[in-house]
Image (spheres, rainbow, N blue to C red):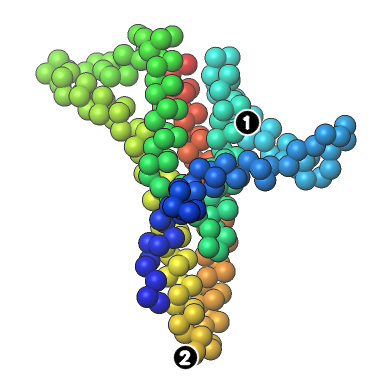
Amino acid sequence: MNENLFASFIAPTILGLPAAVLIILFPPLLIPTSKYLINNRLITTQQWLIKLTSKQMMTMHNTKGRTWSLMLVSLIIFIATTNLLGLLPHSFTPTTQLSMNLAMAIPLWAGAVIMGFRSKIKNALAHFLPQGTPTPLIPMLVIIETIGLLIQPMALAVRLTANITAGHLLMHLIGSATLAMSTINLPSTLIIFTILILLTTLEIAVALIQAYVFTLLVSLYLHDNT
């Protein structure tokens, strides 16, 4: 009970060296691949899910936007596997680190915005000033739209960090309460343990949903600039 509540969010080290890079590279190793002509059920299910997700995100894009399909599918798989692995006991979740989420959000957002300014500069600049704006409000609206554009990657990163961190903290608190009540009141322990199981199921859903939301928002930013 004296354990630091935020100890699980500290980046682990091996012999004094940061192990976050190894942890980030680990999830892709869990994605099964097949060298055979006929795939097994696991590979077939995996390919079906990838095609379904890719089709749902790419239907609104034109030809130029669909060139990002491989990157977006890789992004959602990486975030989903990282979030799910972070639910295991004594594991580290890289997506609870705001720095890592910013490192994913800023380049993707910047690439989409730069593509928009290169291919459709008139439409890109038109977003800063809605049609029919009164002349006295033009400077204020331009400033507000500029701030709104620049804050998009921060919103992406903070949303993912906050949702994953909040779930981990809640599971830690309820787990500690279950352990503390186990020597005091058995019926209360069973009730709290049931809540913990339901919360864990919810966190599995949240891990997948947040991966989808992050990728979908990147896809929407890309759609607005292509």
Query: Taking 183 as reference, is 24 above or below it?
Result: above
Residue under circle 1?
54
- The image shows residue 77 at horizontal and vertical percentages of 60, 40
Looking at the image, which residue sits at the far front? 15
Q: Is residue 133 left or right of residue 24?
A: left
Can residue 163 be seen by looking at this rendering? no
Q: Is residue 96 left or right of residue 58?
A: left
Badge 2: how crowded within 10 Å, few (<14), some, or many (20+)? few
Query: Taking 221 as reference, is 100 above or below it?
Result: below
Q: Residue at x 25, y 29 (%)?
A: 147
Query: Taking 193 as reference, is 188 above or below it?
Result: below
- The image shows residue 13 at horizontal and vertical percentages of 46, 53
Query: Taking 45 as reference, is 55 above or below it?
Result: above
Can residue 40 be seen by looking at this rendering? yes
Residue kind at label 1, given as amino acid type: Ser
Residue kind at label 2, given as amino acid type: Ile
Res. 3 image quadrant: bottom left
- The image shows residue 161 at horizontal and vertical percentages of 41, 48
- The image shows residue 127 at horizontal and vertical percentages of 32, 19
Residue under circle 2?
184
Dot 2 falls on a residue whose secondary structure is loop
Q: Earlier in the sequence, mark 1 or mark 2?
A: 1
Dot 1 falls on a residue whose secondary structure is helix
Q: Residue at x 49, y 78 (%)?
A: 178
